[in-house]
Image (cartoon, coloured by chain):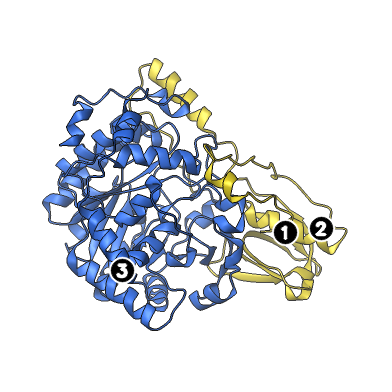
Chain colours: A yellow, B blue
């Protein structure tokens, strides 16, 4: 948790009737400008939260398609690293912040575009059309 | 409480040993997620939105056993994803039974009936079947018509074959407490060992962002549901945790009480939030900034959470950690929680909101019946 996050008081917490949902941030296709170390840290924090693959371009020119699942942020970029899986490897991999030149949110955001309201609309339409066994199905894995 | 004596003995002696050893932080239940792949696409779930190459990955039995051995918790919950989609789930379960771990295999039961012959009944193995309420409620919640009927078939077959079976339900805003109480009647009549229930967590990746209960509404809902109980209802949960949901007790979240392990590693800080991973359980315990989480921290991500993975462990520790707590637990096990005010809550109009788009018929019996 970052220090600037607005915190609730205990009284506010206990009186909550409905918990506010999250606003989905549309990051798909985003290529953050990395002018400073802080820009890089923020971009990688967002990549950690992103439910799609990103493409990392390293300072040696290598490009890596990666699902980032862990960021260990240290005092310097040399002491900070991300962990990721690539689509074609079973092994966890690691790269230091200091080696990253560019971050692109290239993969499809798997948490985007699925809304409860869409399900309700689809359900009501299909029901009205007399369909049976109406369902949302998980996306294909291919 | 419907938990077998042998399981209670295992957990109580574990808690006492940890307390006597002066351990401040120890796990009670390991949340072992062997995969994220699922055969449902539930609106309230934020667990399965990953790229295909991540959904295809799964823990090996050896990785599961190593995590269980390192963690040392006496109970292992196997959620996911859908664990019955894991091709080696039988081997994983058998390995955990050999380690004398009490296992709760959490399943939507779409595959349960088909796969039951591969499993052997054991006091260590419970199928915890996801059912979010009566037929229409459940089907709408999991976004699949017919899901309830398939799950019920699986439950009945599992009970017939001698397996321990519980149901587990997650509730969101708009839940009709009368329907939930009728649902309790239905599942108990099927011969399940007990019911598990929890308010939903506000996953920021879940498709439905408008129905997460705040703490005040959680307490009111669960007071309406859980007061004036019927003797036939059994809960496979700590009575003190249920009192917490009803607003009778205050606990602080202890996220290390039910740590989560999956293909990425040990999840920080808990099963619900995903703020990075540790390579080992020791690293998780020693390097997570625990003070940043829980209600006292003011962290908005924890503000509305009253979920069992953070709050049942302190209730269990309270129950087995002192004579006062133990007596409260015994009292809670046998109490029907008579409450006139809660009866009035049941007579309030059914909630209106996104969750009530499907009309649920009123239960046929009178509310006064709950006083029996």
Pointer 3: what residue? B320
Tag 3, which secondary structure? helix
Q: Secondary structure at mark 1?
A: loop
Whole-angstrom CA distance, mark 3 to mark 2, is: 49 Å
Rendering quarter of residue A137? top left
* Of the two numbered discs 3 and 1 in the rendering, the one whose residue sits closer to the viewer: 3
Looking at the image, can residue A71 be seen?
yes
Q: Residue at x 49, y 23 (%)?
A: A121
Image x and y of residue B125, in percent: 23, 62
Badge 3 and badge 1 in a common chain: no
What is the spatial separation of the Cα atoms under label 2 and label 1, in whole angstroms?
17 Å
Residue A74: which quarter of the image?
Answer: bottom right
Mark on residue A3? 1
Question: Chain for mark 3?
Answer: B
Q: Residue at x 52, y 57 (%)?
A: B54
> Around disc 2, counting alpha carbons within 10 Å, would you say few (fewer than 14), some (14 to 19), or many (20 or more)?
few
- Residue B210 spot, x, y in % from top left: 54, 34
Find residue B56 and report its horizontal and vertical position in percent. 47, 56
Chain letter behind tag 2: A
**Does B161 sit left or right of A24 as displayed?**
left
Q: Residues within 10 Å of mark 3 (few under 14, many from 20)?
A: many
Sequence-wise first label, 2 or 1: 1
Q: Which residue is mark 2?
A: A39
Judge left or right: residue B344 versus residue A19: left
How crowded pointer 1 is (Cα within 10 Å; few <14, some 14-19, many 20+) is rated as few
Label 2 element class: helix
Tell me where residue B76 sits by quadrant: bottom left
Quadrant for the N terminus of chain A in the image: bottom right
């Amino acid at each position: 948790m970052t220090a600037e996050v607005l915190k609730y008081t205990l009284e506010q917490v206990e009186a909550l009737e409905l918990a506010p949902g999250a606003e989905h941030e549309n990051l798909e296709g985003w290529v953050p400008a990395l002018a400073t170390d802080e820009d890089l840290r923020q971009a990688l924090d967002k990549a950690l939260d992103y439910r799609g693959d990103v493409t990392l371009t390293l300072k040696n020119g290598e490009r890596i398609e990666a699902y980032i699942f862990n960021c260990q942020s240290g005092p310097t970029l040399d002491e900070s690293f991300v962990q990721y899986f690539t689509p074609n490897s079973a092994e966890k991999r690691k790269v230091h912040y200091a080696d990253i030149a560019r971050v692109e949110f290239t993969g499809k955001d798997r948490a985007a575009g699925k809304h409860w309201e869409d399900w309700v609309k689809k359900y009501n339409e299909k029901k009205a059309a007399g369909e049976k066994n109406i369902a949302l199905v998980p996306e294909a894995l291919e | 409480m419907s938990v077998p004596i042998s399981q209670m003995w295992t957990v109580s002696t574990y808690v006492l040993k940890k307390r006597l050893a002066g351990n401040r932080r120890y796990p009670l239940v390991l949340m072992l997620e062997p995969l994220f792949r699922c055969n449902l696409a539930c609106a309230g779930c934020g667990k399965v939105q990953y790229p295909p190459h991540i959904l295809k990955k799964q823990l090996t039995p050896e990785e599961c056993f190593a995590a269980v051995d390192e963690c040392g918790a006496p109970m292992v919950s196997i959620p996911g994803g859908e664990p019955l989609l894991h091709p080696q789930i039988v081997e994983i379960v058998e390995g955990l039974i050999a380690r004398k771990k009490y296992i709760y295999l959490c399943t939507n039961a779409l595959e349960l009936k088909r796969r039951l012959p591969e499993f052997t009944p054991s006091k260590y193995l419970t199928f915890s079947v996801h059912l979010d309420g009566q037929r229409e409620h459940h089907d709408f919640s999991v976004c699949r018509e017919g899901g309830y009927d398939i799950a019920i078939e699986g439950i009945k077959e599992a009970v017939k074959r001698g397996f321990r079976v519980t149901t587990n339900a997650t509730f969101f805003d708009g839940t009709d407490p009368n329907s939930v109480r009728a649902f309790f009647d239905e599942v108990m009549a099927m011969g399940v060992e007990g019911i598990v229930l929890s308010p939903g967590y506000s996953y920021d990746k879940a498709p439905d962002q408008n129905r997460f209960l705040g703490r005040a509404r959680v307490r009111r809902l669960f007071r309406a549901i859980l007061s004036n109980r019927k003797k036939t209802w059994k809960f496979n949960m700590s009575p003190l945790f249920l009192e917490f949901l009803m607003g009778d007790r205050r606990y602080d979240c202890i996220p290390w009480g039910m740590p989560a392990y999956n293909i990425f590693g040990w999840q920080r800080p808990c099963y619900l939030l995903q703020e990075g991973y540790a390579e080992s359980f020791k690293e998780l315990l020693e390097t997570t900034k625990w003070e940043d989480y829980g209600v006292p921290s003011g962290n908005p991500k924890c503000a509305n959470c009253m979920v069992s993975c953070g709050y049942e462990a302190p209730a269990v520790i309270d129950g087995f950690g002192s004579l006062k707590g133990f007596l409260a637990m015994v009292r809670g096990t046998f109490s029907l929680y008579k409450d006139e005010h809660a009866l009035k809550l049941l007579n309030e109009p059914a909630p209106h909101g996104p969750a009530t788009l499907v009309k649920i018929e009123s239960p046929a019996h009178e509310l006064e019946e709950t006083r029996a």
